[in-house]
């Protein structure tokens, strides 16, 4: 239904599950040197997205990663899946996120 608003009902917790690093691919396909795993996040780190404004990126979150997962967060905030595991699209240094719908 066009123009119909679907109110957000749930907060969403984002937990950093893993940080991966594909050194072999970086060596094969870039001349950027050895960067190591993503330095923006720490495993176990958590962020909470509000139910009222699920489109707002959490403070301290990576903008590139937010662009990759925000549609899933929005869907959960509006009543979608209870738990979802996803990742950012950095093929050399991906970060794995667990998204959890909260009451």
Image (spheres, rainbow, N blue to C red):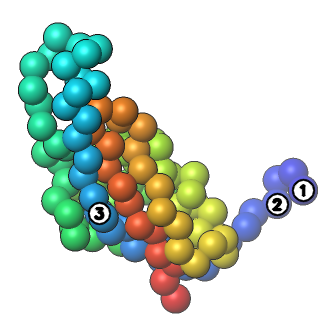
Q: Is residue 43 above or below residue 31?
A: below
Between the residue at mark 3 and the residue at mark 2, the CA separation in whole angstroms equals 33 Å
Residue 68, horizontal then vertical, whole percent: 47, 43
| Relative vertical location of residue 101 with respect to residue 58 in this rendering, above or below | below
Q: Residue at x 52, y 88 (%)?
A: 103
Q: Secondary structure at mark 2?
A: loop
Report if the CB atoms under discs 3 and 1 are less than 8 Å apart. no
User: Residue 81, can we see it?
Assistant: yes
Residue 100 location in percent, x, y?
47, 75
Q: How far is mark 1 from mark 2, CA to CA?
A: 6 Å
Q: CA distance from mark 3 to mark 1?
A: 35 Å
Q: Which of 44 and 14 lies nearest the eye of the viewer? A: 44
**Closest to the observer, 57 or 30:** 30
> What residue did someone put label 2 on?
4
Name the residue beneath numbered marker 3: 16
Q: In the rendering, at what x and y percent does residue 3 appear?
A: 82, 53
Name which of mark 3 and mark 2 comes first in the sequence.
2
Q: Nearer the viewer, mark 3 or mark 2?
A: 3
- Seen as rendered, the residue at the extreme top is 31
Left or right: 77, with 1 as reference point: left
Nearer-the-camera pick, 66 or 18: 18
Residue holding disc 1: 1
Q: Which is closer to the viewer, label 3 or label 1?
A: 3
Among the 4 quarters of the image, the one containing residue 81 = bottom right
Q: Are marks 1 and 2 in contact (CB under 8 Å)?
A: yes
Q: Quadrant of residue 4?
A: bottom right
Across the whole image, how many numbered discs are drawn on residues?
Answer: 3
75 horizontally vs 22: left or right: right
């Amino acid at each position: 239904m066009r123009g119909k608003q679907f109110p957000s009902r749930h907060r969403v917790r984002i937990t950093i599950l893993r940080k991966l690093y594909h050194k072999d691919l970086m060596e094969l396909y870039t001349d950027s040197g050895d960067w190591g795993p993503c330095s923006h996040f720490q495993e176990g780190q958590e962020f909470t997205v509000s139910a009222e404004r699920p489109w707002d990126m959490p403070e301290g979150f990576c903008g590139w990663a937010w662009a990759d997962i925000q549609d899933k967060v929005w869907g959960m905030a509006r009543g979608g899946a209870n738990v979802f595991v996803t990742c950012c699209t950095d093929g050399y240094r991906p970060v794995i996120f667990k998204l959890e719908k909260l009451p």
